[in-house]
Image: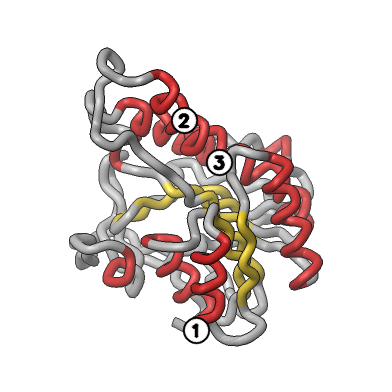
Amino acid sequence: MPRYDLTGKVLLITGASGGIGSAGARKLVAKGAKVALVDLSSDAVGALAAQLPAGSALPFPADVTDVGQMAAAVAATVAEFGRLDVVWANAGIANDPAVSLLTADLTSYERVIQVDLLGVVRTIKPALDQVVQNKGQVVVTGSGYSFLNAVLNSAYGASKAGVEMLARSCAPSSFRTGLRRAFSIRAGRRRRSPTPCRMTSSSTGSSITRSAGRSAPSPSRRSSPTGWSADWKRGHRASSPRAGGRPFPRYAGS
């Protein structure tokens, strides 16, 4: 499958001020992309943008649960860079301390679902016109909790299961103009949707993340994006390919 050349591509990343988001932004810019950095804290995204090459990053404070703010982020990205190719819905929170549904405060419990599930929808929806027009990609950050028992983190688990299915269930008939792919990634591990959401019969786009990790024979296994894991979060590390595993697409020029 052809590599997805990031040179000149424009990506909007939510939850961009730290962890996966900031490490991803740095790596993507190093590969020639431009990034819109979206997070609640104006200071945090501004500080990250200042560390990146001039002209490569646009900081934009916004709340992913507010579709109006996310629409404004998309508009600002297009105004700054002239296009938007990829939307990466990465922002997420969890109940802290962990609670069961029985013991949870309903307001804080539902806030996790608002951010982690509806925030993904409200991030992707305003960006779709641009992404489809530019034959781009939709990326969501998933979790092992999409498939594992999340008894003490059920709001997070239910939300991540929802975004996993969102990535899988893109109907080809809905995007006849050429969206290349929608898929989920996970911290330290990565997997394409089992049925890649190719939106036209001729679409040949590869994934945004490259991988040298394990192939994923079961839903609970994800491969590691080489070069990202060390930057993402402490404790996440790349793993070598499984014998006979199918390699995932790589970045162009990598």
Q: Nearer the viewer, mark 3 or mark 2?
A: 2
Q: Residues within 10 Å of mark 2 (few under 14, many from 20)?
A: some
Q: Position of residue 193 (x, y in %)?
A: 45, 44
Residue 241, placed above or below residue 141: below
Q: Position of residue 215 (x, y in %)?
A: 29, 55
In the image: residue 44, left or right of residue 158: right
Q: Quadrant of residue 59?
A: bottom right
Q: Nearer the viewer, mark 3 or mark 1?
A: 3
Amino acid under disc 3: Val
Which SS class for mark 3? helix
Q: Nearer the viewer, residue 85 or 55?
A: 55
Q: Quadrant of residue 223?
A: bottom left
Amino acid under disc 2: Arg
Amino acid under disc 1: Gly
Residue drawn at point x = 57 percent, y = 81 percent:
32
Q: Position of residue 188 (x, y in %)?
A: 29, 58
Residue drawn at point x = 37 percent, y = 27 percent:
155
Which residue is tagged 3?
A: 120
Res. 111 mark: 2
Instruction: Answer whether labels 2 and 1 touch (C-beta < 8 Å).
Output: no
Which residue is tagged 1?
A: 253
Q: Quick check: can you spot residue 204?
A: no
Q: Nearer the viewer, mark 2 or mark 1?
A: 2
Q: Earlier in the sequence, mark 3 or mark 2?
A: 2
Distance from Cα at disc 2 to Cα at disc 1: 41 Å
Which SS class for mark 1? loop
